Every structure is written in structure tokens, then in C-alpha cells.
């Protein structure tokens, strides 16, 4: 079940439209995204690299730069320790590029997802120490590694943390006490006493801020590092950060750079996945390129994805891109099998009654747990943890819904866990096998989700008749891009549209093309790309088999549905025709 709600946010849309040379309708859509006030609207529509904040505003940035300059001047060895996901790999690449070109003696290490687990561990520190490394710089991890950092310090090492994750805390009677690691500098905008104006950066963005500030402090031209913004964009979209404020600028600018990238590895990946460079947008990062970069850390080693970004020849880049695509194809297949098993467990056992799904798939590849959890969450709209057997007990990943703060809920069960971390909508955890069932019970006993909170919310920007869907309007909507979390595609709605005729298209018969008519008698082509069997089944239940057969054979049937949609255009042999893409129906 879904809850449809219509946004009604007020403002003087006519005046805003005149001021920024946009239609009042677009002004309303921008207001719906909580972009309020001249400065914010101007930044939203026109923000560029020059509008990014100064990295020196981050707490401890000055201290970190003092250390790095000293280490570079003395030729001491620096090692970057990243993470195995898309954000960690790009953050590692950014730090390597920025430090190397600043004259540092620098290398990198990335934990292995299976043998090392997430973030810093004793083994990685030991390895660095044995290799004669003087200074460790973390990226996209480290904020929760107090014990490991204390060990590194006891060996006499210098440690700088750059991260974007939540700072661990403990609840005391008089409030929370935040637990910072004992590093020489901790650069993480999530620290409560950090004055950086935007808290929503990914790890790669924090890394970029650091190398940019380092270059400026060394009197170098930091604009020579602008090319790294394409990596920040990939990490921001791939790590599902909110596309607002600075992130919007990073992704908007980074996408333009990516279309004409000089990076042999990224060029090869774009080519081998068949993405049209000129049309490349945030969707392609999230669903085509990003999963290939992530696949290496899931099924092999993330060092292979880093190798792709660092590739210097076309031959090397083509080979690595092909490897990553093949890894991702096999990841997809393994994921589909695990998703089906998980659904079976939910449908055929007592699990289905739970408000928080804790699904134990013993033989699921542990690196796929998060993807499977995400797919199951989409199906049932409940918080989901997928657990699987690991070398030392059980490991898992969780994906949440808006009303359930996953990290805080896990914090209430931390006595059952050997390790955990994450944020509101996603988390990772480790525990012993005997605690799996107890965790499931405790999470559900603590759960306060109401029935309404567990209904997926479809937020509608405005009701709009089909007559407004024009080529000009579709082009104007491009001003709102890039779309993603925190800046979603606008959702329009039309009630009681009549279904005139329809036909099923596509190699897998998974697209429904229809001719539809709204209450003002405007006809329009409409496409439905997902849940076609469910849509036709809904029509059969309401109108009968005959009516649906007639509809699919081009005969008018007087069937009506209410829909949410996105305006689009069909370009065919030089002719441009407006059409709509249906996103939800009832």
C-alpha cells in the first residue's frame, strides 16, 4: 500500500519566476525541494565551483595540513587507508593524486571486505608499520576506529582521520558523550563542534577539500585539481548522498567533466558499459558505472577499481573495465538468486509478520547483503537486515525506511553485537550466530513503527493536466537536474485518466505503451516501465479479463486509473512528441 500526499508549499511563484527567468511552475518545484530565499535559489540554479565552501572551515583541517606539509618536506612515508566501496575508492584516488602531485612519498591500502572487514583494523596498521610507513591518512573511515588508532599511536605513528560518518557516542544521563578517536587530527564535518556549513559531504568530498586546502597552503594552483571533481561526483551519487547544497554543485560540475573525461579508466568503463557520453547523467553513475566500481570490492578486491582509476594506458584501462563489468554481471546474477531466497523466507515463515525484517541467508555472499536488503526493503517497505555466515560468526547489512533510524536502533542492541556502524538509512553489523534470533526479537520489541509509517509515501509535487506537457516544459525541467536522493525527479499527478489502448513492448515484454486521455480530454502517449504484470492484474480485478484484452487489442474500454507521472519527449526520425512516463498508479 502507498500513501499519496500532495505538497502544498506556498511562495510568490510569479515573482520568483520573473526574477530567475523561469516559469512559475518551475519556481513551485524548487520551493517544494525546500530551496528558499534568493541566495539558495540562485545557488540551486546557477551554483558553480566558485560557490563551494572553504575546506579550512573544517575542524582540525589546519592541524592536518601542518602535519602533511611537514611529512612531505621530510620525505616521510604516508599511507592512505581507504574503504572498499565507491566512495572509499574515489576518496583514496583523490588523496593519492593530490598528495603525489604535492611531492609526497605516498601509497595506499584498501581493506578486503571479507578478510579485513570495514575500515581500519590492527592488521592494516601492523602492515603499514612493517612497511616503514610514518603517517596514516584514512578516508571514508576512521571515525569509529578508536581502538585501532590507539594501537597505531602506541607504535609511534602519526594518524590523520578524514571521514564523513557519524561520530560514535554513548548515552549518559545528562545527554550524549561523543567518542572521538585519539588521532593527531580528525577531519569530519559530522563533528558537533565543526563549523563547516554543510554536513552532508561524502568521504571523497572531504578528501578533495583536504588536497585542495593543502595545495593552497603550499602556494600551488589548486584549480589544477579541478579534474578530481568528477570523482567526487561519482562518489556522491554512488554513496547515495543528498543532492543538495554543495553536493548538487559537485555532481552538476562533475557530470560535465565526466562527459569529456581524460581519465583512461573512466573512459574505458563508459565505453564498455555502452553509456552515451553526451547523455551521461546521475542515473548512469548510480545504476551503470557505480555498480561496476563497487563490484570489485564486493567479489574481488577494491584495489582493482582503484587500478582502473589509476590506469595510464588505454590497453590497461580496457582490460580492467572489462573485468569490472564482468564482475558486476555475475554480482547481478548472484543478487537475484539471494533476493528470491529472501522473499521465500518472508512469504513462507513467521518473518513476514515482523515490522523489522531480520533475514538470515547463511550462504549469501556477504558482500551482497546490503543490495539484497535494499531490494527486500523496496518490496515490503520495512527496515531490513540481511545476515550471512562470515569467517568469524555472522555479518550483515541493513537498509531502512524514512521513519526508522537504523544506527540508533542498533545502538540499543549493541550488547548483542561484536561490531556495528552506519547512519539513519543503512548500517553494517557483526554478531555471533547464537545472537541472530535474539537480535531479531529485540529489534522488533523495540520497534515503534506505526502502520502508516510502514506505507510507502508517494509525494506529489502538483496535479497537472496533460496539455501542460510540452517539449518546452520538458527542456525547462532539465534545470532541476541532477536528480537523486534529496533532489528527486518531480512527481506530477492526474486523476481518472482513461486508458484508450495499450500494447506490450520490449525484448522481455516488460514495457507497456498506452494511449491515455485525461479529464480535460487531452490524449497523450504513456509508458509504464515497471510492474507491468501487477498493473494489468489490478485492471483485471477491477474491470475483468475481457476489458483488459480489448484494451491490449486497441479497443476503447472506459477503464480509468489515477497516476503519478514524469513528462518526457519521444524523439523519432526528427519528430519530437510529448509523452509521459507513469511512476505510480491506483
Image (spheres, rainbow, N blue to C red):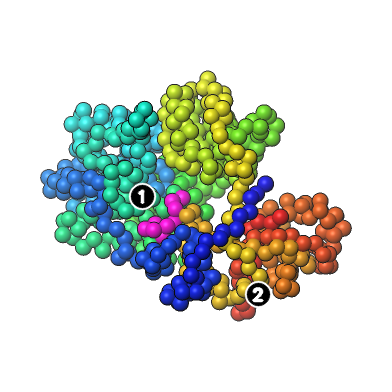
Packing grade of label 1 (10 A; few <14, some 14-19, many >=20) is: some
SS at badge 1: loop
Packing grade of label 2 (10 A; few <14, some 14-19, many >=20) is: few
Residue that carries the numbered disc 1 in the rendered image:
199
Q: Is residue 244 magenta?
A: yes
Q: For the view shown, which residue lies furthest in the right direction?
A: 546
Front residue of 333/470: it is 470
Residue 441 point in image, percent of width and height: 57, 25
* Relative horizontal placement of residue 117, taking residue 562 as reference (left or right): left
Q: Residue at x 63, y 54 (%)?
A: 4
Q: For the view shown, which residue lies furthest in the bottom direction?
A: 574
Visible in this render: residue 236? yes
SS at badge 2: helix
What is the quadrant of residue 136 in the picture? Answer: top left
The quarter of the rendered structure image containing the C terminus is bottom right
Of the image marks 1 and 2, the number of the one nearer the N terminus: 1
Residue 114 point in image, percent of width and height: 44, 33
Front residue of 375/556: it is 556
Q: Residue at x 18, y 31 (%)?
A: 156
Q: Which residues are magenta?
A: 240-248
* Relative horizontal placement of residue 294, taking residue 549 as reference (left or right): left
Residue that carries the numbered disc 2 in the rendered image:
467
What is the quadrant of residue 576 in the picture? Answer: bottom right
Residue 352 point in image, percent of width and height: 66, 33
* Relative horizontal placement of residue 83, taking residue 534 as reference (left or right): left
Q: CA distance from mark 1 to mark 2?
A: 41 Å
Q: Residue at x 45, y 35 (%)?
A: 408
Front residue of 12/417: it is 12
Amino acid at each position: 500500500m502507498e500513501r499519496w500526499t500532495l505538497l502544498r508549499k506556498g511562495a510568490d511563484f510569479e515573482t520568483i519566476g520573473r526574477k530567475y527567468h523561469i516559469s512559475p511552475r518551475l519556481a513551485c518545484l524548487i520551493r517544494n525541494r525546500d530551496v528558499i530565499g534568493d541566495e539558495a535559489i540562485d545557488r540551486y540554479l546557477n551554483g558553480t565551483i566558485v560557490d563551494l565552501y572553504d575546506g579550512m572551515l573544517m575542524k582540525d583541517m589546519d592541524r592536518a595540513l601542518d602535519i602533511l606539509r611537514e611529512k612531505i618536506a621530510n620525505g616521510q612515508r604516508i599511507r592512505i587507508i581507504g574503504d572498499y566501496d565507491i566512495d572509499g575508492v574515489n576518496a583514496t584516488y583523490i588523496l593519492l593524486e593530490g598528495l603525489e602531485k604535492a611531492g609526497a612519498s605516498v601509497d595506499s591500502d584498501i581493506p578486503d571486505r571479507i578478510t579485513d572487514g570495514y575500515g581500519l583494523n590492527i592488521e592494516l596498521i601492523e602492515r603499514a608499520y612493517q612497511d616503514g610507513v610514518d603517517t596514516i591518512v584514512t578516508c571514508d573511515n576512521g571515525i569509529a576506529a578508536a581502538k585501532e588508532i590507539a594501537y597505531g599511536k602506541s607504535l609511534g605513528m602519526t594518524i590523520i582521520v578524514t571521514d564523513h560518518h557519524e561520530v560514535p557516542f554513548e548515552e549518559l544521563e545528562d545527554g550524549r558523550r561523543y567518542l572521538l578517536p585519539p588521532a593527531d587530527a580528525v577531519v569530519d564535518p559530522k563533528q558537533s563542534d565543526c563549523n563547516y556549513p554543510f554536513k552532508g559531504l561524502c568521504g571523497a568530498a572531504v578528501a578533495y577539500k583536504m588536497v585542495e586546502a593543502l595545495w593552497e597552503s603550499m602556494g600551488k594552483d589548486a584549480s589544477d585539481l579541478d579534474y578530481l571533481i568528477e570523482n567526487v561526483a561519482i562518489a556522491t551519487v554512488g554513496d547515495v548522498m543528498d543532492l543538495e547544497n554543495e553536493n548538487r554543485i559537485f555532481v552538476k560540475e562533475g557530470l560535465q567533466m565526466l562527459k569529456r573525461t581524460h581519465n583512461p579508466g573512466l573512459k574505458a568503463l563508459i565505453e564498455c558499459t555502452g553509456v552515451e557520453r553526451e547523455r551521461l547523467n546521475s542515473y548512469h553513475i548510480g545504476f551503470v558505472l557505480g555498480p561496476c566500481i563497487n563490484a570489485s570490492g564486493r567479489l574481488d578486491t577494491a584495489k582493482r577499481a582503484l587500478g582502473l582509476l589509476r590506469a595510464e594506458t588505454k590497453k590497461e584501462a580496457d582490460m580492467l573495465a572489462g573485468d569490472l563489468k564482468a564482475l558486476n554481471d555475475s554480482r547481478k546474477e548472484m543478487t537475484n538468486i539471494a533476493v528470491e531466497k529472501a522473499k521465500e523466507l518472508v512469504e513462507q515463515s513467521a518473518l513476514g509478520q515482523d515490522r523489522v525484517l531480520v533475514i538470515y541467508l547463511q550462504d549469501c555472499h556477504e558482500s551482497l547483503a546490503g543490495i539484497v536488503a535494499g531490494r527486500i526493503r523496496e518490496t515490503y517497505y520495512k527496515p531490513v537486515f540481511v545476515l550471512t555466515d562470515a569467517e568469524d560468526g555472522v555479518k550483515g547489512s541493513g537498509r531502512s525506511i524514512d521513519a526508522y533510524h537504523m544506527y540508533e536502533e542498533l545502538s540499543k542492541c549493541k550488547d548483542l553485537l561484536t561490531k556495528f556502524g552506519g547512519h539513519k538509512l543503512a548500517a553494517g553489523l557483526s554478531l555471533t550466530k547464537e545472537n541472530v534470533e535474539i537480535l531479531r526479537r529485540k529489534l522488533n520489541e523495540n520497534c515503534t513503527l506505526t502502520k502508516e509509517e510502514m506505507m510507502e509515501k508517494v509525494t506529489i509535487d502538483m496535479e497537472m493536466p496533460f496539455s501542460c506537457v510540452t517539449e518546452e516544459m520538458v527542456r525547462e525541467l532539465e534545470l532541476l537536474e541532477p536528480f537523486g536522493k534529496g533532489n528527486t525527479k518531480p512527481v506530477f499527478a492526474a486523476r481518472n485518466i482513461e486508458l484508450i489502448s495499450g500494447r506490450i513492448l520490449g525484448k522481455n515484454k516488460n514495457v507497456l505503451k498506452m494511449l491515455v486521455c485525461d479529464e480535460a480530454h487531452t490524449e497523450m502517449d504513456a509508458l509504464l516501465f515497471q510492474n507491468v504484470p501487477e498493473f494489468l492484474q489490478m485492471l483485471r480485478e477491477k474491470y475483468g479479463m475481457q476489458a483488459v484484452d480489448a484494451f491490449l487489442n486497441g479497443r476503447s474500454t472506459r477503464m480509468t486509473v489515477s497516476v503519478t507521472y514524469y513528462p518526457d519527449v519521444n524523439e523519432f526520425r526528427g519528430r519530437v512528441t510529448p509523452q509521459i512516463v507513469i511512476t505510480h498508479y491506483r
